[in-house]
Image (cartoon, coloured by chain):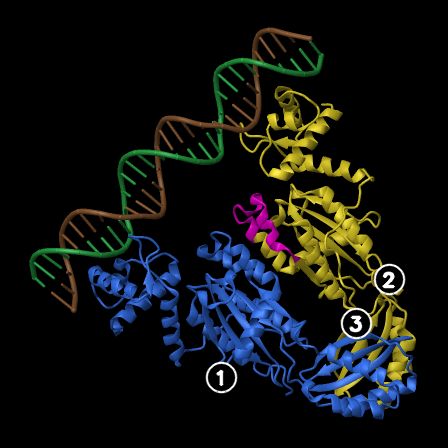
Chain colours: A yellow, B blue, C green, D brown
DNA sequence: TGTTAGCACTCATTCCGGTCGAGTGCTAAC
DNA sequence: GTTAGCACTCGACCGGAATGAGTGCTAACA
């Protein structure tokens, strides 16, 4: 079966109409709304073809047609290919510049949800490739040290560590000096066993302490476990009747609330993301999570500079306004790009 | 109208039955379920009295009765007066001891939600009365300082500050020493203008810098703005049909998601909480927020020691199991009590 | 060969009337 | 004061008729 220009225009018309109304769209509607000036009967013939091709279905006999996942996929792919997409302007897009990434991302999620009317999620950046900038050990109690670690982008992390062995004031001082001179500017990957051995021998204090300190440092900038996920606008999904029927709404909100699952998803996806464009669309069954089988998810990877990358996701019904969402995400990307980079 | 023992037993029976089923309860049901051995007709007479007193209503003619807010209030007040309440044991109540209060509270909220099947919220502690324990200024960049503030309970806060004026290494060293000796052990309230003047004169460096640093310290331990609120189990409300009808579920979840409103509520409530027992019950209309008009909220104030107090709230339908909830909260309170105190 | 008008058909939705049953209020008897 | 009996109310449920949007198919038309 040939997929000619007219069929595509009809498919597009169906998708766009369904996007607005959420109702199955009939042949008459298409016949009037498009500028093809074809009668409903002709449209019906074409629609029969489109259905045969698996791009649209009717939810029940004698109802209008709605697009299938495959239909959306075709539409989205064509849309993504059109590079002449204009960046949609955003209302109220003013996020105050703060030094806390966390707050920034939280606001960003909120803003995105308000602008798109979909649910949003945004993950904190991973620090994989990030360079250490500053390490400071301070005595807080007799046998309690506070380790403060600053990485590039001025992200601050800290942990408290209980010492098994006493450390003198002088040892602490030299340890601080040693750590800063040796580790500064290195990424986590670059701190290998050889370097650790090297440090241990040079420290002049017991190896246990060094080991403990390094563990704390690693702990402070650990990525997997406490990668934060911020969500917003979960209740937006109530705006789409096709998601509120049954318990899809409930399970969806559950997934958004319990961030663990989202985190795993993102970590799985992130690794396979192509570094290029970065914006990806997952439609219905393409999502691994069952709770999102009735949704589409658009993700984008942001880069705060210095290899600190995270993911933004927009979760909505399959009939979401892909064009707007992709545009919005691109505009956000450009805002985020290097937002925390040194000026 | 006299409220004798028998009426109270009937009211209690109605409330408890309604608690389980969520359906209006009829006279026959009461007649069989209680050990009063009265016929349904007698119960009907009593129920008519109870209705006249405004303790129960029928949702429509010829339906069973359900308790009113006033009825619940009576029930709860009597229950709270019974001090011989046994502490309900909790399943899976093992929160790993962590040094991060945040994580701890988050887990706590989750655990509570899982145990009670209601939605829960828990606020981070306020630091009003908290004493400073340790201050550390470190140079990160040429004109960027990192201020790390540790308060009692080993809560760590930090901010980055940009200096308008250069500070030498020696100045930094003496500043650290000065700050620690002068401010250690003081609460925020105790750092007044006289003390600041004193510091400025002793510092031997420009007053601007002192001012900037103190602002940063104040900023780091500021309480109002970024008091965190952790919620969990929001989707539990889907388990109660009377909350899912209409858009109450939606607006409820919205309120839980958008923590701002909760924060304001808690801040309002907290101030008027009597320091004694601490557990309070708000039924239906007693809540200031319209989105919670169909709910009851049970709150408790916890004390981590050193005056770090916060609030735990459990949000459920009016027919929530007050007895269990109050018991659970009390058990949690005893766990939390001084959990972060130095041993 | 592509397009269109007409027509019969399908099927979800809505409305309506009837039945059912749980529950009540009232009265009279115990 | 308690209970049995009875009429009454009203929501819930069910089945059928009416409605209407939308389709597929066929035949006519350009």
According to the image, label 1 marks what residue? B276
Give coordinates of residue A130: x percent, y percent. Answer: 84, 65
- Residues at marks 3 and 1 touching, judged by CB atoms closer than 8 Å: no
Which element carries disc 3, helix, strand or loop? strand
Please give the label number shown on residue A156. Answer: 3
In this rendering, the label closer to the viewer, 3 or 1: 1
Residue picked out by circle 2: A306
Q: Is residue A240 magenta?
A: yes
Question: Which residues are drawn in magenta?
Answer: A232-250
Secondary structure that dominates the magenta span = helix
Quadrant in the picture for the C terminus of chain A: bottom right
Whole-angstrom CA distance, mark 3 to mark 1, is 39 Å
Q: CA distance from mark 1 to mark 2?
A: 52 Å
- Numbered label attached to residue B131: none
Work out whether residue A94 or residue B160 is closer to the camera in this orientation and state it. A94
Compared to residue B325, the image places residue D16 above or below, namely above
């Amino acid at each position: 079966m040939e997929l000619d220009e007219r069929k595509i225009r009809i498919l597009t018309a169906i998708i766009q109409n369904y996007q607005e109304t959420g109702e199955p769209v009939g042949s008459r509607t298409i016949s009037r709304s498009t500028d093809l000036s074809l009668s409903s009967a002709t449209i019906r013939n074409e629609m029969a073809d489109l259905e045969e091709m698996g791009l649209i279905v009717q939810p029940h006999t004698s109802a209008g047609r709605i697009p299938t996942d495959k239909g959306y996929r075709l539409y989205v792919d064509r849309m993504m290919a059109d590079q002449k997409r204009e960046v949609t302007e955003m209302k109220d897009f003013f996020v105050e510049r703060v030094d806390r990434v966390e707050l920034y991302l939280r606001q960003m999620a909120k803003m995105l949800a308000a602008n798109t009317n979909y649910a949003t999620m945004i993950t904190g950046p991973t620090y994989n490739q990030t360079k250490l900038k500053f390490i400071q050990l301070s005595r807080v109690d007799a046998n309690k040290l506070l380790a403060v670690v600053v990485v590039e982008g001025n992200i601050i992390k800290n942990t408290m560590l209980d010492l098994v062995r006493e450390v003198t004031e002088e040892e602490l001082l030299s340890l601080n000096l040693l750590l800063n001179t040796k580790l500064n500017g290195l990424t986590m990957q670059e701190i290998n066993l050889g370097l650790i051995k090297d440090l241990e021998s040079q420290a002049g204090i017991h190896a246990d302490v060094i080991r403990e300190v390094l563990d704390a440092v690693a702990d402070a900038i650990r990525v997997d476990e406490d990668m934060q996920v911020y969500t917003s606008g979960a209740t937006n999904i109530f705006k789409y009747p096709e998601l509120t029927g049954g318990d899809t709404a409930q399970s969806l909100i559950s997934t958004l609330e319990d961030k663990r699952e989202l985190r795993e998803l993102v970590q799985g996806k992130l690794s396979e993301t192509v570094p290029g464009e970065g914006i990806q669309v997952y439609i219905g069954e393409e999502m691994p999570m069952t709770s999102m089988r009735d949704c589409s998810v658009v993700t984008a990877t942001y880069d705060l500079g210095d290899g600190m990358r995270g993911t933004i996701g927009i979760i909505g019904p399959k009939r979401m306004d892909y064009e707007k969402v992709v545009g919005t995400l691109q505009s956000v990307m450009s805002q985020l790009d290097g937002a925390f980079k040194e000026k």
